Image: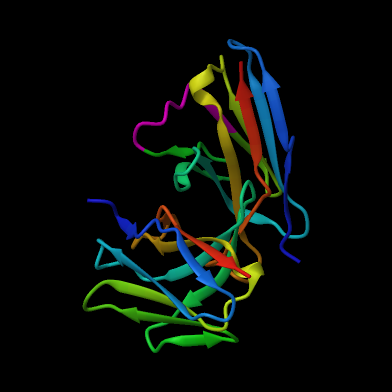
Amino acid sequence: GAVVSQHPSWVICKSGTSVKIECRSLDFQATTMFWYRQFPKQSLMLMATSNEGSKATYEQGVEKDKFLINHASLTLSTLTVTSAHPEDSSFYICSARGGLAVDTQYFGPGTRLTVL
Amino acid sequence: RKEVEQDPGPFNVPEGATVAFNCTYSNSASQSFFWYRQDCRKEPKLLMSVYSSGNEDGRFTAQLNRASQYISLLIRDSKLSDSATYLCVVNTEDSSYKLIFGSGTRLLVRP
């Protein structure tokens, strides 16, 4: 149980395009979903917290107009990187909290974004 | 000062060795503590939660010292498959359930 999927697992795009990443909780309803970014040899950095049906809460320094988050249902959150640039190339990981273990975050497998 | 600090390593140990990782956190109000394992290019996976009384799961033992704001992980009888990056993780003290990750300690277990 408590499986979280992400799609796509990797994506390569041209500079200036937008990329949408999906995060789904497959067997539980996610009260909250979190989006992280990880650059090489660095730790996961929380970008935003997303609750179903409400606006996401962004961490300091994360541009909400560039990283659009939609959490339309209890099992799906999407992150759209708008007008992507090479410096946005990173490993994007989502996690979901919900089900019986309220303190536990279940992580998706991540999406590797490369912007050319 | 980073909120969660770890020695980046790498720790290079032979199979069968015992290895210990340390971590310090800055927020004394933090309530929950974890060790995660992350393999290269993969997502982090929960290894174990850390409780005030200390806890053990097979070859892994975790300790928490709230007074010193210090967390440790001990791995006994290291296996080749233990090679990974170990992330010390602390929650925020509010109700948001946000996790703060350390930068990780890399472990290499050699034959």
Model colouring: rainbow
| Residue at x 52% of width, y 67% of height | A103
Residue A66: percent from left, percent from top: 50, 22
How many labels sit on residues? 0
Would residue A61 be counted in the magenta stretch? yes
Q: Nearer the viewer, residue B110 or B64?
A: B110
Q: Is residue B21 magenta?
A: no
Residue B54 % position (x, y): 42, 87
Relative to A35, say whether A99 is above or below. below
Q: Position of residue B28 (x, y in %)?
A: 24, 68
Using the image as rendered, state which of residue B58 and residue A107 is in the foreground.
B58
Q: Is residue A8 left or right of residue A61?
A: right
Is the stretch drawn in magenta largely helix, strand or loop?
loop
The residue at 25%/61% (across/down) is B26
In x, y percent, where is residue A41? 47, 44
Residue at point 49% right, 37% down? Answer: A39
Q: Which residues are magenta?
A: A60-69
Left or right, A26 with respect to A106, comes to right
Identify the residue shown where x is 61% and y is 50%: B40
The answer to whether B108 is drawn above or below residue B58 in the figure is above
Quadrant position of residue A68: top right
Displayed quadrant of residue A69: top right
Q: Does B53 sit left or right of A83 as displayed?
A: left
> Where does the C terminus of chain B fall, quadrant-wise?
bottom right
Task: State the residue in front, B98 or B21.
Answer: B21
